Image (spheres, rainbow, N blue to C red):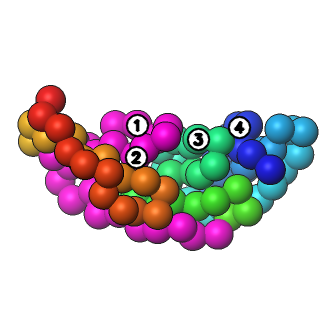
Amino acid sequence: MTISSVVQRGSSAYVYNEKNQTSCTISLGSGSLCGFSSSFVCVKRGSTLYVYDEKGHSLSTISVGSGEFHSCAATINIKRGSTLYMYDEKGRSKGTRSV
């Protein structure tokens, strides 16, 4: 099933499928929901981005460091300085580009 929406309530993120049923609940702890796509959810805790699938299973962790999280769609984009680093949901590098 695909992710159709994710709602943050308090310290939890509720993941909904295309039938508007709750697929899973992800504990955010002291982190925050950053975004989602049809196949994964991004949660930032400190300087690390955690990526989960529609069932709440961890797919990868990506160090954000002093960079800025920019988007979570087909790729996960993190800006560090004037460079945009692109990753897939497994945390594998998909390239960089200057911004």
Question: Which residue shows up at 40% across the image and 46% down it?
Answer: 76
Assess disc 1: are there few (<14), some (14-19) or many (≥20) residues with their C-alpha within 10 Å of its C-alpha.
some
As measured in the structure, the alpha-carbon distance from the residue carrying label 3 to the one carrying label 1 is 10 Å
- Check disc 4 and report its element: helix, strand or loop: strand
Q: Element at badge 3? A: loop
Judging depth in this view, the residue of 31 and 60 nearest the camera is: 60
Measured Cα–Cα span from mark 2 to mark 3: 10 Å
As drawn, the label of residue 71 is 1
Residue at image mark 2: 76
Marks 3 and 4: CB-CB under 8 Å?
no
In terms of sequence position, does the residue under pointer 2 or pointer 1 come before the other? 1
Q: Are marks 4 and 2 in contact (CB under 8 Å)?
A: no
* SS class, disc 1: strand
Task: Give neighbour class at mark 2: few <14, some 14-19, many 20+ (Cα, 10 Å).
Answer: many
Give the side of residue 70 with respect to residue 36, left or right: left
Which residue corresponds to mark 3? Answer: 37
- Give the distance between the C-alpha atoms of the residues marked 1 and 4, in whole angstroms: 15 Å
Mark 2 → mark 1, Cα distance in angstroms? 6 Å
Q: Secondary structure at mark 2?
A: strand
User: Amino acid type of disc 2?
Assistant: Ile
Residue labelled with disc 4: 5
Residue 88 visible within the image: yes
Question: Label 1 amino acid?
Answer: Ser
Q: Which residues are magenta?
A: 57-80
Residue type marked 3: Ser
Q: Is residue 71 magenta?
A: yes
User: Which image quarter is the C terminus in?
Assistant: top left
| Magenta span contains residue 42 | no
Q: Are marks 2 and 1 in contact (CB under 8 Å)?
A: yes
Left or right of 36? Residue 64 is left
Looking at the image, tell me whether mark 2 or mark 3 is earlier in sequence order. 3
Of 60 and 16, which appears nearest the observer? Answer: 60
